[in-house]
Image (cartoon, rainbow, N blue to C red):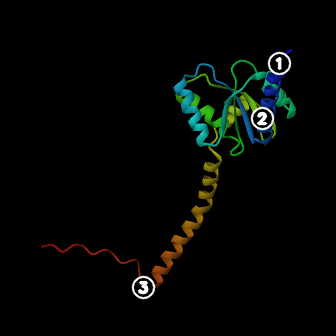
């Protein structure tokens, strides 16, 4: 029978993990086996920049927390496991892991996870890794909207210049000595 103090500390860890999983828009479980300390430091830096919390977790305690949230990750939570979760861009954790693994030629593998309440397999999450970030997608859509408006503004300006008496004044050539 475990000591009462140890049991209370484990319960606190489970409560913390439960809260993180419930609040997160995305939770991705990663097998980090084979990563060096320098690579791990760089990966953590990228996660921080994207506002993703990345922590190494104990499988048993995480399993309890996931069950509290209504998820079953018994097949996923084995071996070395880290959890990347965010309340922001839901595809950020998977994208960062996939890009980092490709860039560093690592076996850093996604085990599975949850995106906006839906349990997804490692393969599905790896597919998210191929997508650009939410901000990049929004910028692309806005750029698409902006192009016709810019073209219209240019045409209207050309018409205005034409009606005012011709085209824009040409630059004078420098006089030769």
Mark 1–mark 3 Cα distance, whole angstroms, equals 92 Å
Nearest to the observer: residue 69 or residue 174: 69
Query: Do the residues under discs 2 and 1 have CB atoms within 8 angstroms?
Result: no
The quarter of the displayed image where residue 46 is located: top right
The quarter of the displayed image where residue 85 is located: top right
Q: Which residue in the protein does label 1 denote?
A: 3
Q: Which mark is residue 16?
A: 2
Q: Which mark is residue 165?
A: 3
Q: Which of marks 2 and 1 is nearer the N terminus?
A: 1
Q: Name the residue at 65% across, 47% down.
A: 134
Query: Do the residues under discs 2 and 3 have CB atoms within 8 angstroms?
Result: no
Disc 2 versus disc 3: nearer the observer: 2
47 horizontally vs 60: left or right: left
Q: Name the residue at 61% across, 53% down.
A: 140
31 horizontally vs 172: left or right: right
Q: Position of residue 68 (x, y in %)?
A: 87, 32
Q: In this view, does 176 lie above or below 37?
A: below
Whether residue 119 is visible here, answered yes or no, is no
Q: Name the residue at 47% across, 84% down.
A: 163
Q: Which of marks 1 and 3 is nearer the N terminus?
A: 1
Image quarter of the N terminus = top right
15 horizontally vs 144: left or right: right
Image quarter of the C terminus = bottom left
Q: Position of residue 136 (x, y in %)?
A: 60, 49
Disc 2 versus disc 1: nearer the observer: 1
> Which secondary structure lies at badge 1?
loop
161 horizontally vs 70: left or right: left
Mark 2–mark 3 Cα distance, whole angstroms, equals 72 Å
């Amino acid at each position: 029978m475990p000591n009462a103090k140890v049991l209370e500390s484990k319960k606190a860890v489970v409560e913390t993990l439960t809260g993180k999983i419930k609040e997160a828009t995305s939770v991705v479980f990663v097998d980090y086996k084979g990563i060096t300390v320098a690579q791990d430091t760089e990966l953590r830096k990228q996660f921080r920049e994207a506002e993703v919390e990345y922590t190494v977790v104990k499988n048993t305690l995480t399993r309890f927390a996931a069950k509290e949230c209504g998820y079953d990750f018994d097949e996923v939570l084995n071996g070395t496991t880290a959890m990347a979760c965010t309340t922001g861009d839901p595809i950020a954790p998977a994208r960062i892991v996939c890009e980092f693994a490709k860039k560093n030629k690592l076996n850093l593998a996604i085990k599975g996870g949850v995106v906006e309440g839906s349990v997804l397999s490692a393969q599905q999450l790896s597919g998210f890794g191929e997508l650009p970030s939410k901000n990049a997608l929004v910028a692309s859509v806005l750029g698409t909207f902006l192009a016709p408006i810019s073209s219209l503004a240019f045409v209207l300006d050309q018409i205005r210049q034409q009606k005012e008496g011709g085209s824009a004044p040409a630059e004078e050539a420098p006089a030769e000595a």
